[in-house]
Amino acid sequence: GENVEQHPSTLSVQEGDSAVIKCTYSDSASNYFPWYKQELGKGPQLIIDIRSNVGEKKDQRIAVTLNKTAKHFSLHITETQPEDSAVYFCAADGSSNTGKLIFGQGTTLQVKP
Amino acid sequence: DAGITQSPRHKVTETGTPVTLRCHQTENHRYMYWYRQDPGHGLRLIHYSYGVKDTDKGEVSDGYSVSRSKTEDFLLTLESATSSQTSVYFCAISEFSSYNEQFFGPGTRLTVL
């Protein structure tokens, strides 16, 4: 089955710097790669997603890149702000068509003011 | 915020007792999911439902059962709770199966002593 590895597990940056989180997946049939942000005490919330027919997608300060050949995708946050501090999860849908997602282990991002 | 509630929000129970967690949605979404979140493991799918009375197993389904008798309610039951089931449990919903955002509930923290 699908396996998703996420790195790093923790990331600390200064406010204004960029942050990059990387994920690799194992199932070449995966077609959908969402990123979720989880604030303390809350459920995860989708921040951006990308489909396999697109190499890059951007939404304001957040961008995701996908390399299907290498089976990895990355989240890029520019001009980080303290409110970006949270746990971020990547996920992949595997080869099923059921909406099931396989999540990475999570990255705790700390943005220091 | 999507209309998802989970009950109870916190529960402490003893090994061997049955436990039922409830997820209730007001969005009329077809797909519902139960995840558990543990440090170092991210979110792992326990069971999911693709319609009333239609359910299937996820990656960590042993020791758990589910039921969905109405569109709005998805119940997760631990028949005989064990300490390894101490976790934070999240319910999620989505309107479609593929390429679709999952909306997460606020979570239930379960402690099995």
Image (tube, rainbow, N blue to C red):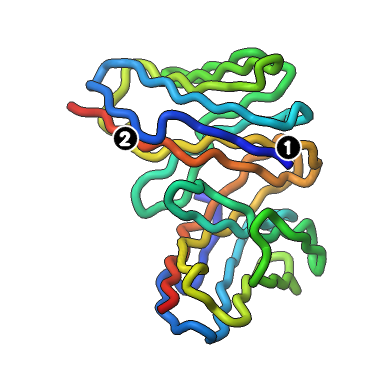
| Relative image position of residue B49 (x, y in whole percent) | 74, 60
- When asked about the image quadrant of residue B63, the answer is bottom right
Identify the disc placed on residue A94: 1
Q: Quadrant of the C terminus of chain A?
A: top left
Q: Pick whichever, B1 or B8, lies toward us.
A: B8
Q: Residues within 10 Å of mark 2 (few under 14, many from 20)?
A: many
Amino acid beneath label 1: Gly
Q: Is residue B23 above or below residue A25?
A: below
Q: Is residue B67 left or right of residue A10?
A: right
- Closer to the N terminus: mark 1 or mark 2? 2
Residue at 75% across, 74% down? B69
* Quadrant holding the N terminus of chain A: top right
- How far apart marks 1 and 2 lie (CA) works out to 28 Å
Q: Position of residue A97 (x, y in %)?
A: 81, 41
Task: Identify the residue under disc 2.
Answer: A85
Residue B100 drawn at (x, y percent): 68, 39
Residue at 59% across, 52% down: B44
Task: Name the subunit of mark 1.
Answer: A
Asked if residue A106 lies left or right of residue A73, the reply is left
Q: Amino acid at mark 2?
A: Ser
Q: Residue at x 40, y 40 (%)?
A: A87
- Where is residue B57? Give x, y as percent: 74, 60
Residue occupying image coordinates x 65% and y 35%: A92
Pointer 2 chain: A
